Image: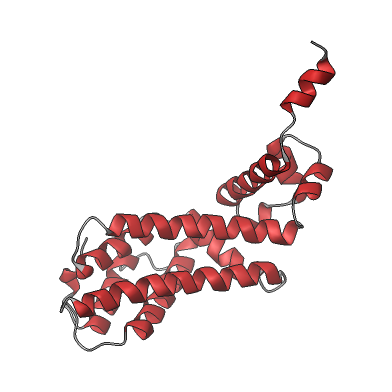
């Protein structure tokens, strides 16, 4: 069999190549940060010429936005899965805090921070950042509202508390990247603040 026919058989379809490029971008983002997702870096990881990446990707802005979205959506899915080990909303929120603050620093937190910064110059990324923040807020609000319906919380504004909690998580997570103020622990600090918002004892928010 000739080398030419073997090469033709091994050639990947456009869909396969796009998935390979997208996966490479996600891996680079997690390993080195969102700002490391460049045309040359992706091409080197896939093992192809930069021109082939440019041909299959819808531009680097879109590829960076896609990498960001894939990473943070996977994080949200993992957090929600970890919370589902129990029915109690209070305990589930405790698991949430333990999970999001589990690593110091968190690689995904760096991607969030870079997403906010790079999104000021990349509108496609900004759109994706806003969408993923909305997804997090909706998930938190749904869990808080679920706890209210179960009688675990009183008459509270689940939507507002979700935004408040998200702001605390984002702010303390960003501070944790440079290891600022490690004491008290970020988890305990957030637990006390959330407990006050929900009207429960801080110890109730333990996973």
- Nearest the eye: 168 or 5: 5
- Residue 92 visible to an observer of this rendering: yes
- Residue 185 visible to an observer of this rendering: no
Answer above or below: position of 71 versus 132.
above
Rendered-image quadrant of the N terminus: top right
Give how far across and how far down residue 19 sits, in percent: 64, 44
Q: Specify the color scheme.
A: secondary structure
- Nearest the eye: 144 or 192: 144
Residue for point 50% across, 72% down: 133
Give how far across and how far down residue 75 sits, in percent: 44, 57
- Left or right? Give the position of 178 relative to 9: left
Give how far across and how far down residue 96 sits, in percent: 31, 63
Residue 197 image-quadrant placement: bottom left
Answer above or below: position of 133 versus 63.
below
Residue for point 72% across, 38% down: 13
Give how far across and how far down residue 173 sits, in percent: 44, 66
Answer above or below: position of 155 versus 174.
below
Residue for point 43% across, 77% down: 167
């Amino acid at each position: 069999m000739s080398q030419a026919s073997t090469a033709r058989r091994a050639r990947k379809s456009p869909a396969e190549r796009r998935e390979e490029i997208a996966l490479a971008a996600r891996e680079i983002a997690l390993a080195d940060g969102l700002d490391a997702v460049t045309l040359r870096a992706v091409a080197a990881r896939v093992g192809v010429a930069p021109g082939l990446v440019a041909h299959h990707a819808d531009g680097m802005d879109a590829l960076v936005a896609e990498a960001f979205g894939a990473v943070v959506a996977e994080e949200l899915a993992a957090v929600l899965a970890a919370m589902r080990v129990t029915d109690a909303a209070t305990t589930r929120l405790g698991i949430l805090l333990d999970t999001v603050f589990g690593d110091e620093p968190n690689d995904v937190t760096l991607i969030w921070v870079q997403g906010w910064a790079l999104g000021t110059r990349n509108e496609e990324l900004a759109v994706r950042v806003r969408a993923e923040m909305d997804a997090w807020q909706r998930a938190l609000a749904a869990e808080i509202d679920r706890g209210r319906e179960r009688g675990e919380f009183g008459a509270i504004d689940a939507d507002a508390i979700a935004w408040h909690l998200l702001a605390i998580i984002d702010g303390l997570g960003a501070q944790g990247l440079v290891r600022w103020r490690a004491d008290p622990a970020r988890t305990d600090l957030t637990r006390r603040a959330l407990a006050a918002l929900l009207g429960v004892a801080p110890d109730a928010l333990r996973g």
